[in-house]
Amino acid sequence: MSHVKCIAGQVFVGPIGGAEEEEGSVTVRLQDVAAAAGVSTATASKALNGRGDVSETVRRKITKVAEEMSYAPRPRSRPGSSHPRLTMVFDHFSSPYAVAILNGAIHAAKRAGVDLVTTCIEGESVGHDVMSMAWLRDLVKDGVAGLIVVTTSLDDATVRWCRRNALPLIAVDPASPNREHVVSIGSTNWQGGKQATDHLIGLGHRRIGMACGPGDSVPAGERLQGFRSAMQLAGLAVDESLVAGDGFTPEVGRVAALRMLHSEDPPTAIFAVSDDVALGVLRAAEELGIGVPGRLSVIGFDDTSAASWMSPPLTTVRQPLGSMGQVAVERVLALAGDSERFAHPFQLETRLVVRESTAAPA
């Protein structure tokens, strides 16, 4: 029987109770850390487990040595259940995008009979330190079978640490590129960006703006490249003054659209990097008294549940968000069973969904 349970800002999905895991391949022992730090094994244990009878100076020294040696504690035994446990980390949890990803992950976890705990980096309390080395060590100590990160930056040291300590890692829509290999789950972002732009070009638009995402975001960059490719293949120049924005929020879309629409030669259409950004574009058009799609066509990306309720209903590129969450759970479990499986990135197909926010230019 699976359940959903919220504890201290986390969502727990799966059979209530602990999970007994196979031990990860930990190559560095606590005794090794203690010897390198010049302390007793007991002192090292107290420091790494947050005991209060160790000075802060000694604790910092031992923690630094443990991180340098890629030490991870042995998993705790969790009697009473043989269900694996997964942890899923969101950069933030304030958009329909995140809800759709989580919904797919929940269904996959229920089908697989695994426990799923989710947490969020944005707004974390002091000392919580999600994705810190200490937090990762606790995951291994607790016998977590795998880690899924959603739109979250991963540094190469974290990727290496997870690999060395046999903690399977999956990135959904990674926030930035990595030199270290990470198994990623996403959609055909380049193709989706091209589909969106081709749709606007097919309607007769020639001055097309792009409301962009963060500069280091992998999916945002791929969508921008799809936009540029479609324009180039159509023989249209990209006016760089109509390429603006650096985030995935409605306010980013609003500011970017106001900048474009106040220009001497404004666009007749704007492709927004996400539905949330498109919402901000629609707000900017409303503020300026510009009718959509009469004077401005707007197209988004994601096809979240909010898209069809916008005014007007949003034309967008659908990426299968629920399936992305589902596949992430399935793939991290496969990696937990065999680290050599599914080592390549996985992309799901996008498709154009035409609604009422796009039309031929006036």
Image (tube, rainbow, N blue to C red):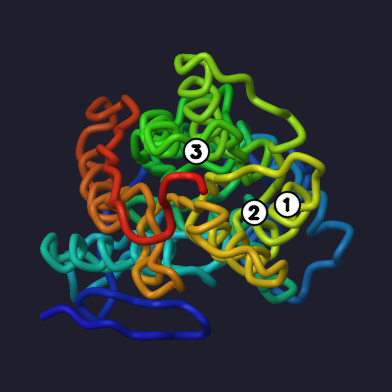
Q: Hey, what amino acid is under mark 1?
A: Leu
Please give left or right for residue 74 compared with residue 209 in the image.
left
Name the secondary structure under disc 1: helix
Q: Name the amino acid, label 3.
A: Pro
Query: Of discs 2 and 3, which sits in the foreground?
Result: 3
Helix, strand or loop for disc 3: helix
Q: Where 18 sits versus 207, above or below?
A: below
The vertical placement of 155 against 93, above or below, is above
* Image-based side of 181 in relation to 256, left or right: left
Q: Residues within 10 Å of mark 3 (few under 14, many from 20)?
A: many
Q: Quadrant of the N terminus?
A: bottom left
In the image, residue 282 sits, relative to residue 62, either above or below, namely below
Q: Give me the residue at 46% from left, 73% from top.
A: 311
Whether residue 25 is visible: no
Disc number placed over residue 248 in the picture, else none: none
Circle nearer the N terminus (3, 1): 3
* Residue beneath disc 2: 132
Tell me where residue 116 sits by quadrant.
Answer: bottom left
Q: CA distance from mark 2 to mark 3?
A: 24 Å
Along the horizontal axis of the image, is 222 left or right of 243? left
Q: Residues within 10 Å of mark 1 (few under 14, many from 20)?
A: many
Inspect the image, locate mark 2, and give the three-letter code of the amino acid beneath it.
Ser
- Asked whether the beta carbons under mark 2 and mark 1 sit within 8 Å of each other, the answer is no
The residue nearer to you, when weighing 264 against 220, is 264
Q: Is residue 217 visible?
A: yes
- Residue 270 percent location from the top left of the image: 57, 46
User: What numbered label is drawn on residue 219?
Assistant: 3
Looking at this rendering, what residue extends furthest in the front direction? 362
Query: In this image, 313 relative to 218: left or right?
Result: left
Picture disc at residue 261: 1
* Image quarter of residue 168: top left
Distance between the Cα atoms at labels 3 and 1? Answer: 25 Å
